[in-house]
Amino acid sequence: MSLPRKMLIDGDQETAAAAVEKNYDFDLFVIGAGSGGVRAARTSAGFGAKVAICELPFHPISSEVIGGVGGTCVIRGCVPKKILVYGAQFQGEFEDARNFGWELSDQIDFNWKKLLHNKTQEIVRLNGVYKRLLSNAGVTMIEGEGKIVSADRVEVTQPDGTKQQYSTKHILIATGSRATRVNIPGQELAITSDEALSLDELPKHVVVLGGGYIAVEFASIWRGMGAKVDVLYRKELPLRGFDDEMRAVVARNLEGRGINLHPGKNIVELSKTEEGIRVLTDNGDVIMADTVLFATGRAPNTKRLNLQSVGVEVDKTGAIKVDEYSRTTVPNIWAVGDVTNRVNLTPVALMEGTCFSKTVFGGQPTKPDYNYIASAVFCIPPLSVVGLSERQAIEQSGSDILVFTSSFNPMKNTISGRQEKTVMKLIVDSETDKVLGASMCGSDAPEIMQGIAVALKFGATKAQFDSTVGIHPSAAEEFVTMRTLTRRVAAGKPKTNL
């Protein structure tokens, strides 16, 4: 649904009149203090709005009644995960160091509890940082579970059970999403990504169900720390939705690092035995493990918000339906971030929160721009992409697609002896010469891709890439030296779905 400029700022006449007549407690009440909610609260306060925000009490492992300021990304997502990825990378670095002259003892011990403690200390620190950011912006913080009572009233249940209602001109829902479990016998024996970031003991043998980015990231983490890892997923390759060629590269790298991949398999039952958890697959195979991770997706946090009674519509997954300005089916109720299930990335939630504030309180109706959003999968080594995959370009472009690739042994590996190639790829429109997509799997890929994203955002052509002088010696320079065409693909002829 599209909204005219006047309605975006003022709402319909009846709503505007009611706002004049009624003395509200707040101009904006935000439910959920994750990345999107905090950004929206702060920027709205910066425009002069009187803002309140509520969030569940802090805990590393979320539930319907615990959470914490900072949300999934800071407390049980991107930040702690990246800390564990850093920790897991050192094993490979130690191995590679020997051929660079470092004499290391045969036994190198790893202290999981120390890393876990330091990780927890960091997320506690960041939780405090986010609280200070809100306080410094003049936002009223309320601890407890928020639900919508009416279009202009929110009720917060505090940790002690006390309930308090607040009136508000606008409500913003930013409650994010939570990891889901597979409905199979023995599902209670498995963990989700929440628990995976806070395990008391480092697993010895892990079975991961799922082929998405969370699955391959945790597989890389645990394998890097010495655990045996099996990954089961339904497709032929992991990372559905990413470029097929790069998916194959990631799969090779995972196997090269000692991770056992089981494409086309699913788990049908878990049971507890004296030896550990018995994992039964759909083809009758049995794998014994001490830890099983369900990495099969996330669901929007909407069940306890009382949305139906006030007329806020959700889709079949529970995601809140919004228009291009993040407005729900109720004029003064809005939603941003994973709870809307648009592009579920932290920086996207930040963008949506900023656009909301500009639209509602800044007098600048602003739509989030979802074009050329770069993203990364922090497996080891990482994958990073921006723009269209080869398949997407073939399907969407009206002209032939030019594909440029580079696969090479990075300079570091020529000395270390590690057999792991870096792969880069550019997708180019044959008529306009515009670069439609870029991807890289290899060390520092996310750091490199952020700069490439700026170029693609501003419509860079392949000729402009070619005319750019590279930094030597670096892997990044390959992006400006790929002048030999790998293949030309006719428009409208996608490859087989993997």
Image (spheres, grey):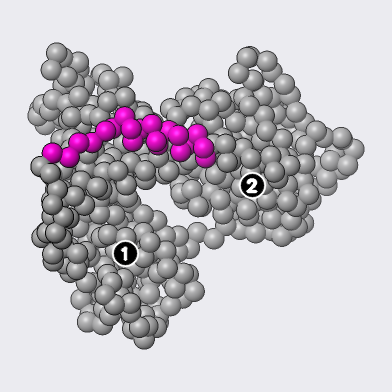
Q: Looking at the magenta stretch, what is its main secondary structure?
A: helix
Whether residue 433 is visible, yes or no, is no
Does 477 sit left or right of 345 as displayed? left
Considering the numbered disc 1 on the image, is that residue within a helix, a strand or a loop?
Answer: strand
In this view, the residue in front, 15 or 339, is 339
Q: Quadrant of residue 217?
A: top left
The residue under the point 13% across, 55% down is: 98
Q: Which residue is mark 1?
A: 439
How many discs mark residues in the rendered view?
2
In this view, the residue in front, 129 or 170, is 129
Q: CA distance from mark 2 to mark 1?
A: 31 Å
Marking on residue 40: 2
The residue under the point 20% across, 24% down is: 290
Badge 1 crowding class, 10 Å Cα cut-off, few under 14, some 14 to 19, many 20 or more, is many
Q: Earlier in the sequence, mark 2 or mark 1?
A: 2
Magenta-span inclusion, residue 125: yes
Query: Tag 2: residue type?
Result: Ala
Whether residue 367 is visible, yes or no, is yes
Q: Quadrant of residue 85?
A: top left
* Image: magenta residue range: 107-126
Magenta-span inclusion, residue 2: no
Q: Is residue 464 above or below residue 176?
A: below
In this view, the residue in front, 404 or 182, is 404
Query: Tag 1: residue type?
Result: Ser
Q: Position of residue 415 (x, y in %)?
A: 13, 64
Q: Position of residue 27 (x, y in %)?
A: 77, 41
